[in-house]
Image (cartoon, coloured by chain):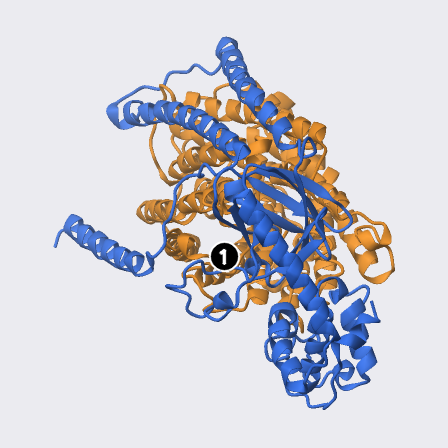
Amino acid sequence: MSFKKLTARWFAAIAGVLSMLLVSVANAEYTLNLTEGVTPISRDLHGLHMVVFWICVAIGSAVFAVMAWSIFFHRKSRGVKASNFHESTKIEIIWTLAPLLILIAVAIPATSTLLDLEDAKTDADINLQVTGIQWKWKYKFVDEDVEFISSLAQSSRDVVKDPLGNENYLLEVDEPIVLPINKKIRFLFHSNDVIHAWFVPALAVKQDAIPGFINDSWAIIEEVGTYRGQCAELCGIEHGFMPIVVEAVTQADYEKWLNGKKAQALAVAAAAEEKWSMEDLIAKGETVYKVNCSGCHGVTGAGIPNVFPAMTGSDIVLGDIAGHIDIIVNGKAGTAMAAFKTMLSDVDIAAVVTYERNALGNSVGDMVQPSAITGLR
Amino acid sequence: MTNATTTTDHDDHDDHGPAYGLSRWITTTNHKDIGTLYLWFSFIMLLTGGSFAMVIRAELFQPGLQFVEPHFFNQMTTMHGLIMVFGAIMPAFVGLANWMLPLMIGAPDMALPRMNNWSFWILPFAFSMLLSSLFMEGGGPAFGWTFYAPLSTTYAPASTDFFIFGVHLMGISSVMGAINVIATILNMRAPGMTLMKMPLFVWTWLITAYLLIAVMPVLAGAVTMMLTDRHFGTSFFDAAGGGDPVMFQHIFWFFGHPEVYIMILPAFGIISAIVPTFARKPLFGYSSMVYATGSIAILSFMVWAHHMFTTGMPVAGELYFMYATILISIPTGVKVFNWVTTMWRGSMTFETPMLWALGFIVMFTIGGLSGLMLGVAPVDTQYHDTYFVVAHFHYVLVTGALYSIIAAYYYWVPKWTGNMYNETLGKIHFWWSTIAVNVLFFPQHFLGLAGMPRRIPDYALQFAEFNMISSIGGFCFGLAQVFFLFIIVKTIKGGKKATDIVWEGATGLEFEELPSPAPYHSFNTAPEVK
């Protein structure tokens, strides 16, 4: 068999395997380019991206064309004798100044877009505080007394070993943030622990959430829809598992949702006053633990040796219940253990304490009522 | 020895050969031996860091968590970056400098040979320490090679102290190496070799050495502040104690951006040596190349915060850093234009070193152009921390820096061993690597533009196709470098004998004045440069 035939066969075989592999996973739309998005800024950015992209393509093509010409025509095998020129001040000046002009042409629209992008303060309709927490997002409407935490949906966690066919895998949350369309929303970013970045491509918002700082950004969403994003700054073990889902709705739907949230908050407060049974607390606690604690302390409570303590057999869990509650409510300074009083309700804290003491291989046998947590805040 | 006159003085009583056995390598002060040690060390690190990349690409082959836990995945991305930057690329350039600088300027050895020995032998200890952290309880560093605080301080595993000490050692080694390069170039040039007659590899290394001396102490400062934050109660980067996590990034990138040029300026020097040889035509615009290298080096100190456009910098800062950043594309463009013009109306042949050099020019230009896109601050909102950035810096570091190192290997290995490498195998190595590396990194542009963040162990389903393609390219590229090991060993063992000039169009003292292989002691009497 000739060498050419052999290589052709190899290519066919490889192409066959590749296309088979690709077909087997092709269950979502992929894109090649930046998409336009649904905010005025995202469209400006897309336009600017395309301008710069085509300039790059033009420069690259010109350089490669000259190179290709030399490679084909100025080769020794064609009997070409090398010429000896090696200097020309004129041409050097030209190819220094021409790129400078191109860069100025890029810098002008880039400057005006940047000034626009950075103007979050002017005429904001809604101020939304976004707090990054390992590994979830907390949203708080500054003027509305509504706040909640949004984390990766259980439906994604359940299929991490084999996610094919799971729609919106890793891009689904338990509680999406709902925002009205055609309003200027100013986001205020902050972090409780390490640096995170709130990134939703369709809104063209990517801003770091940094402990000790408040950064801002803005968006006017022009179309009703669901927009998904992820944390973009490495923030620890579950960095890949803290998605963002924004539901953009009409003003009326937004108000309805907001009122529902307020009613929900009242119900949660009322639930804290009730007396809970141990079974109910453990059942509730399991959900709370999976969402908030399992990232570090492990789904089975095994932790990660020397980084995150195990829950199973832990001195704190098996010890005095007041100490156990205290570390969850107030956290432990200088470590990754956060103060959960700002993130969890009284019921959640009581439930997770009860769960940890009576599950994950522990059986202390005691429990705490939500009402007992209220006084500790 | 037809067309070269050796200047090695055979009557010289000091002209003895190397010692035998292991003690030759441990106690050596010979620049060629130390160069060889550096090159082997960096190759071992290339395969180590490469195997970490294989773990990363295997996990990302399909959506879902199949092979490793996220915590280990983070250790792999971190170690891959650290090993490749500090263990593979930088020592490889130092190895080339050790071998070639004395030969290129007509010096008998490096200026400070004992320090030279020490600066190499620190490295195996530094990297053993760094790598050993992977086996410690709690795992190794898992905060990315950029180790942003507070993830690398308050929230880091216990082994981080080994990382800190390892970085200190690497810094000491680099600074000593840089001092040696500067002392050699400024003091030991052959009579007649004025600064503006030096080969560009010598020029680019001289400028690189100054960059190293300027920024390695900054890195040492950053890790020392981390250390005191972790153990001695300071709050440099801890907001709760009045510190500033963003200050960490400013300090890191004040080191990190010149570091990028530390890894690419010597590459420019190598390409500027290879292209004229195989075009049989002198380098176009020698002096503008020197000035362009100088301006790139100076500008590299003034653009660091373009890595931080999303940290909430004041808009005036963002504007300044955008303008300064895109300005760098001008001197870099001048270099590419000069190489292309050198080829123009030359008489070109395409031996393996030339192929790698041409691959460098094309793909480094692609990486440079995506760098220009990233420099445009408003659009960086969309690109930042996505795979677009990953694609960009792998185009400049793999098909840029690494390609130039491989090109340099094929170009100078006949002078080192006296044997020609096998031309067919070299060409297979080139085409295999070049196809694989583009399958590997080009689709990552698409992933980034579609919004896939970097450093994630698992991803949403719309990213599946290009990740799989990228992984296949990754495995092929990794395998190609194992094939390279075979070529290296084969060339040391034997092969067609190299002539003294090696390449028809070669110029420079190392080809014109020395036999192949270069003797253990060369230029004991300095050559005369006209």
Residue in the picture at 52% in, 46% down: A248
Indicate the amino acid at tag 1. Leu
What kind of element bears circle 1? loop
**Which residue is tagged 1?**
A171
Q: Position of residue A349 (x, y in %)?
A: 72, 73
Tell me the blue chain.
Answer: A
Q: Chain of mark 1?
A: A
Q: Give left or right: position of B523 versus B274.
A: right
Residue A359 vs A71, above or below: the answer is below
On screen, residue A134 above or below B174: below
Q: Residues within 10 Å of mark 1 (few under 14, many from 20)?
A: many
Question: Does any portion of residue A57 appear in the rendered image?
Answer: yes
Decide which of B376, B329 is in the foreground and name it.
B376
Residue at the far left in the pictured view? A1
Which quarter of the picture shows residue A343?
bottom right
- Percent position of residue B227, x then y: 80, 57
Q: Nearer the viewer, residue A179 or B153?
A: A179
| Vertical order, B19 against A220 (above or below) | below
Q: Which residue is more in the foreground, B192 or A344?
A: A344
Residue A211 position (above or below residue A62): below
Residue furthest to the right: B233
Q: Position of residue A265 (x, y in %)?
A: 68, 62
Residue nearest the observer in this picture, A203 or A269: A269
Instruction: Say which quadrant the C terminus of chain A sits in.
Output: bottom right
Residue B492 position within the rendered picture, expressed as x and y whole percent measured from the top left: 44, 54
- Chain letter, orange in picture: B
